[in-house]
Image (cartoon, grey):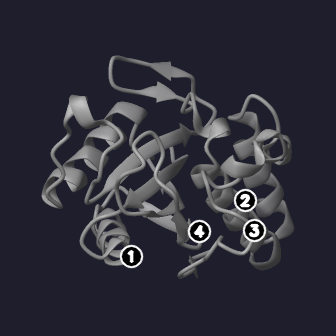
């Protein structure tokens, strides 16, 4: 039986215990899953915390994967990685410090709603710390991937946003361009393109 492969975009974030290393570990655990093919990873960005300012800055990235898994199963795999890495979800400190945060942003162009998952992610178009890595990933794909593949991925991303990515970025308040980063503070840390 042939499995249908789906494109998924996952946001990664950490602000505890060497955040860069935590993102690298999460990516390694994700890549070790037999049903996951990591296609590309954005640069890592240093970003200001949102919702609770009295905590260390975050390191954020996004990765594009191909998988036969449906949204709910993929979310369960992501939460399993979070648990393996020591994350305990506390509903009272939703925006507090965390060892790892893996958010499923989109799976193909599926619209999905459950108690613990909404696709496409309902707030990604308002979050500079998500949009900047997506833009960086697309810009790198533009120069490294086949033109048709880049155009397909760009169209997929834009189809999952309420307005095109460029418009989402232009509508962010200046202080929210990457959730509090000012020009010159956007600091890609590392990049890996697997296309």
Quadrant where the image shows the C terminus: bottom right
- Which numbered circle lies on residue 183? 3
Mark 3 or mark 4: which comes first in sequence? 4
Q: Is residue 162 above or below residue 27?
A: above
Q: Compare residues 187 and 42 and report the one nearer the observer.
A: 187
Determine crowd level at label 2: few under 14, some 14-19, many 20+ residues with C-alpha closer than 10 A: some
Mark 3 or 1: the one toward you:
3
Q: Compare residues 23 and 35 and report the one nearer the observer.
A: 23
Mark 2 or mark 3: which comes first in sequence? 2
Q: Residue at x 74, y 28 (%)?
A: 162
In the shown orientation, is residue 36 left or right of residue 64?
Answer: left
- For label 4, the residue is 42
Mark 1 or mark 4: which comes first in sequence? 1
In the shown orientation, is residue 10 left or right of residue 174?
Answer: left
Q: Residue at x 70, y 45 (%)?
A: 157
- Which numbered circle lies on residue 20? 1
- Disc 4 is placed on an element classified as loop
Farthest residue to the front: give it: 54
Q: Residue at x 48, y 52 (%)?
A: 11
| Count of marks overlaid on the render | 4
- For label 2, the residue is 135
- Disc 2 is placed on an element classified as helix
Cα separation between marks 3 and 4: 19 Å
Asked if the residues shown at circle 1 and circle 2 are in contact, with their CB atoms under 8 angstroms apart, the answer is no
């Amino acid at each position: 039986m042939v499995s249908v492969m789906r494109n998924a975009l996952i946001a990664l974030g950490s602000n505890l215990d060497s955040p860069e290393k935590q993102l690298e570990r999460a990516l390694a655990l994700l890549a070790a899953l037999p049903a996951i093919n990591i296609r590309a990873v954005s640069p890592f960005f240093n970003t200001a915390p949102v919702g609770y300012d009295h905590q260390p800055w975050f390191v954020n990235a996004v990765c594009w994967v191909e998988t036969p898994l449906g949204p709910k199963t993929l979310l369960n795999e992501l939460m399993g990685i979070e648990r393996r890495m020591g994350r305990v979800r506390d509903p009272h400190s939703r925006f507090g410090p965390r060892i790892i945060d893996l958010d499923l942003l989109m799976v193909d162009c599926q619209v999905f709603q459950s108690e613990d998952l909404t696709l496409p992610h309902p707030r990604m178009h308002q979050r500079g710390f998500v949009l900047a890595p997506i833009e960086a990933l697309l810009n790198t794909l533009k120069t490294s991937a086949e033109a048709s593949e880049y155009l397909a991925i760009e169209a997929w991303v834009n189809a999952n946003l309420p307005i095109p990515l460029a418009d989402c970025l232009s509508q962010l308040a200046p202080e929210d361009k990457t959730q509090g980063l000012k020009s010159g503070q956007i600091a890609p840390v590392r990049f890996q393109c697997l296309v």
